[in-house]
Image: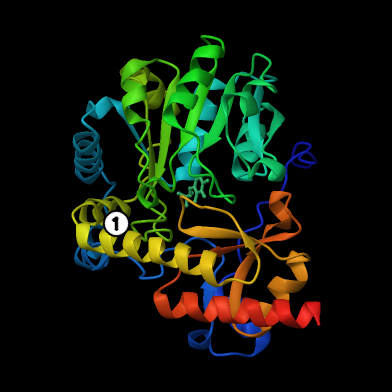
Amino acid sequence: MEPRDLSSHAVYRAGRGIEEVARELGLDPDDLVKLSSNENPFGASPKAADAVREHADRVASYPKTSHTDLTAKIADRHGVADEQIWLTPSGDTALDYLARAFIDPGQRVLVPTPGFAYYPMSARYHHGEVDEYRMEKADDFAQTPETVLDAYDGHRIVYVTSPHNPTGSEMALDDVRTVAEETDDQTLVVYDEAYIHFTDSPSAVDMVEERDDVAVVRTFSKAYGLAGMRLGYAVTPEAWADAYARVNTPFSVTELTCRAGLAALDDDEHVEKTVETAKWAREYMHENLDARTWESGGNFVLVEVGDASAVADAAQRRGVIVRDCSSFGLPECIRITCGTREQTRRAVETVNEVLAEVSA
Ligand SMILES: *Cc1c(COP(=O)(O)O)cnc(C)c1O
């Protein structure tokens, strides 16, 4: 026998891992700078790492109290009821849970292009069909209500990313509200705030309180430095608590993940250092890269380099791993994650060298 027809399902192309690249190039991983996956350059919150060690011997039991406690803590932070927090093993899984709860087979969803590859993947896993709305380079990837609404045709879910990956552009909350208002009652607006910590723009969580057709997605992978733990959540209208209970895979968020999340939420110092450095790095890249860059609200900058694949390969041979944005539909751009000051300076120097060589 065979799996069902998966030909319309794309494979997720992740940024390359540091050990993978080191092995391939015969280099010491410590000599490489990896700025390709928007991870936290300072690593995990130290408090979270301690919590993982401290609770290591608890993994024989299913997670129960830790899940309840983490849900309550997140809800408290947002000033919402515990039932409104759908805790999930990663932001990607929060997208899956929403798709599980909302998509009937054959229903259509609307995703941004360029955009995050997992929206269409998740929708297709859940037997949805995918249409795209375009963000234009000529408009600096502006996200206006029209960007979305011009392509809207009664879709079941509309995905909005702000700050947007990989462009860094943002959609103002009033514009998100307009999208939610102008679309059908039965259209869910999924507002992905994976990079919210890195912008001064407000969160859409208040809009979840105001309306019944908006859900906010969050992750612990970026600002908290817990990409390897896999932890995220959705903030949803209170009326959907029953849906979460029905779509949740039992005990999907692990004991150690919950403990790490609880500790990370108390580590303001780590988040502050991370955000401050990312803001510095964005400015540094805008000012010093010999290439076109775009304003970014995230912990990364999009850079126009011509042949992204060639530039990313050449930078990698010099020990700096950046993201070739071909898989995002931008074969002329790379995305550079904000590193520490030292990493960011090295990345800029390396990319500038590569660009000079290419144009020579
Ligand atoms: C990183 C990211 C996520 C979630 O990442 P997880 O590691 O799965 O939590 C969601 N949306 C966007 C746009 C992202 O860049």
Residue for point 42% across, 29% down: 173
Q: Is residue 151 above or below residue 297?
A: above
Left or right of 68 in this view: 174: right
Q: Is residue 104 above or below residue 347?
A: above
Residue for point 45% across, 70% down: 339
Left or right of 256 in this view: 306: right
Q: Is residue 178 above or below residue 87?
A: above
Which of the 4 image quadrants contains residue 156?
A: top right
Count of numbered badges drawn on the protein: 1
Q: Which residue is identified by label 1? A: 256
Q: Position of residue 265 (x, y in %)?
A: 23, 51
Q: Position of residue 306 (x, y in %)?
A: 77, 64
Left or right of 237 in this view: 158: right
Q: Of residues 317 and 356, which is closer to you in this image? A: 356
User: Which residue appears farthest toward the front when viewing the image?
Assistant: 287
Q: Residues within 10 Å of mark 1 (few under 14, many from 20)?
A: many
Residue for point 47% across, 78% down: 343
- The quarter of the image holding the N terminus is top right
Q: Position of residue 280 (x, y in %)?
A: 39, 66
Asked which secondary structure carries label 1, the reply is: helix
Q: Of residues 124 and 287, which is closer to you in this image? A: 287
Amino acid found under the numbered disc labelled 1: Leu
Q: Position of residue 53 (x, y in %)?
A: 24, 68
Which of the 4 image quadrants contains residue 103?
A: top right
Q: Of residues 197 and 232, which is closer to you in this image? A: 197
Q: Kindly tell me whether mark 1's CB lies below 8 Å from ligand 1.
A: no
Residue 322 appearing in the image? yes
Q: Is residue 162 above or below residue 41?
A: above
